[in-house]
Image (cartoon, rainbow, N blue to C red):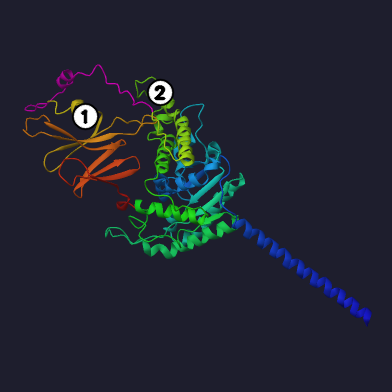
Amino acid sequence: MSDANGINGSAMNKKTFKSICLVWLTCLLFGSAQVHAQRPFRLERNEVVAFLGGANMVYLQKAGYLESILSEHFVQSSPQFRDLAWEADTVFRQGTVIERWRKRAHFDQDGGLGDLNNQLKRIGASMIISQFGQSESLEGLEALAAFSEAYSTLIQSWLKDGRRVALLTPTPFESSDNPHLPNLAQQNEILSQYVNVIRQLAKKHRVFLVDLFHQATSNATSNGRHISPEAHPIIARQIADQLGIDSHSHDALHPLRNAVIEKHRLWLNYWRPTNWKLLFGDDARRQFTKGPISLREEWLTLPRMIAEAEERIQHIAIHGTDPGPNRPPKEILHGDPQANIEKELAAFTLPEGFSINLFASEQQGLTSPLNVRWDPSGRMYVTTTTTYPHVFPGDLPNDKIIVLEDKDRNGVADTSTVFADGLNIPTGIEWGHGGIYVGQNTEILFLKDTDGDGQADQRRVTPEWFW
């Protein structure tokens, strides 16, 4: 009996031992995953952080709040930040990849910048902060599985090269005060399912997660979808707080943010130049300047300027004083010495009864006019550019809208007023809603003169008209 009991007791001990081992192993694995998921967010020495996403990530980076918080908190690590976000980007298509001259350049020595991973390698990215899901959710639940698979593939490709990843969920849709826009808030039930997928992917791939969907501030958008300028500092603080970073000391006038915005502007001029085709595309061999160096040589001076801008950020973060942007001297513009008004007027062939005369010229500020519109009072609005084909490296674009008025109706402009300046190649202009809409780069601006002095005193980017 004792032998039998002994044998049975031994069997029980083995079974119990196996159960204990199984429980211990489960706890070990679970505990390891929890520690990994809850590890503190940090930026290593000389870390390069790449931002990926759609329009809201573009706006977040341009606003500069989040990068300022990270730059100050991790000042001893001297991190660098590179924006690869692109309006309308999704997990299926990224603008930085599909832009055709990024795949193939018109110079034998430049084969384009390659796919996304090649571009990340080119900039030395070691950390990815990504935000996707909002645009994709508009395709409905039918596209949810494809979204999960495509996003997972992206994350795997980033992790494969040893990068760390932080996923930002989208912010919720909101209803808009504009009756001409759909009520996107009705899409939040579907968007929540995309957010759940993002949470699952963060857990699966053991990467950082920042949930802006369940913790976002209300009234954060200008059109129900795109984050408004007023909400950007709030969203940046929410991201920082969830990453365990103190952000209470930052405000809109922080000098560090001004330096970050300047660096970001230089980076966009390098990575997303206004006229990529003039650098690498069909027009790359055309002569657009009489300056001492070519457009491509100008463009290649930007990395040095970006590095200097980062040194300025570092100096402010450490010492609290701003050494200034140290911009280069203004570009010297070259007029054509062969220009002759009398000869040009004489060259016109006019129908009988018509005449032609010079209405206005560079003397009234019309340097490289692009577009003309007339207002109901008979005043001429002209967009002009000294920036085209792209901004002089390090300089601030300062294209203008000039208002010309012929008060005595003799066919010659009597007054010239700068309606707006600080523009960047304004390629379109149209009247509407008591003001002027201006297309420049990826933006549509709304400008309005509210006090009747002929100068715009209201200016805003108008994503609310386009969703």
Q: Residue at x 61, y 45 (%)?
A: 162
Magenta-drawn stretch contains 244? no
Q: Earlier in the sequence, mark 1 or mark 2?
A: 2
- What kind of residue is marked 2? Ser
Asked whether residue 96 is in view, the answer is yes
Above or below, 323 against 451 in this view is above
Seen as rendered, the residue at the extreme top is: 338
Please tell me which residue lies in front, 271 or 251: 251
Which residue lies under the disc numbered 2? 294
Q: Position of residue 263 (x, y in %)?
A: 43, 38
Q: Position of residue 443 (x, y in %)?
A: 33, 44
Are there few (<14), some (14-19), or many (20+) residues within 10 Å of tag 1?
some
Are there few (<14), some (14-19), or many (20+) residues within 10 Å of tag 2?
some
Q: Main secondary structure of the magenta part?
A: loop
Q: Rounded to the nearest whole Å, what is the CA distance between mark 1 and mark 2?
A: 26 Å
Name the side, left or right, on which 392 lies relative to 339: right
Magenta-drawn stretch contains 344? yes
Q: Position of residue 428 (x, y in %)?
A: 27, 40
Please tell me which residue lies in front, 116 or 129: 129
Judged from the image, the secondary structure of the residue bearing numbered disc 1 is loop
Question: Magenta region: which residues?
Answer: 328-356
Above or below, 230 against 390 in this view is below
Above or below, 306 against 190 in this view is above
Above or below, 195 against 382 in this view is below
Q: Nearer the viewer, mark 1 or mark 2?
A: 1
Which residue lies under the disc numbered 1? 365
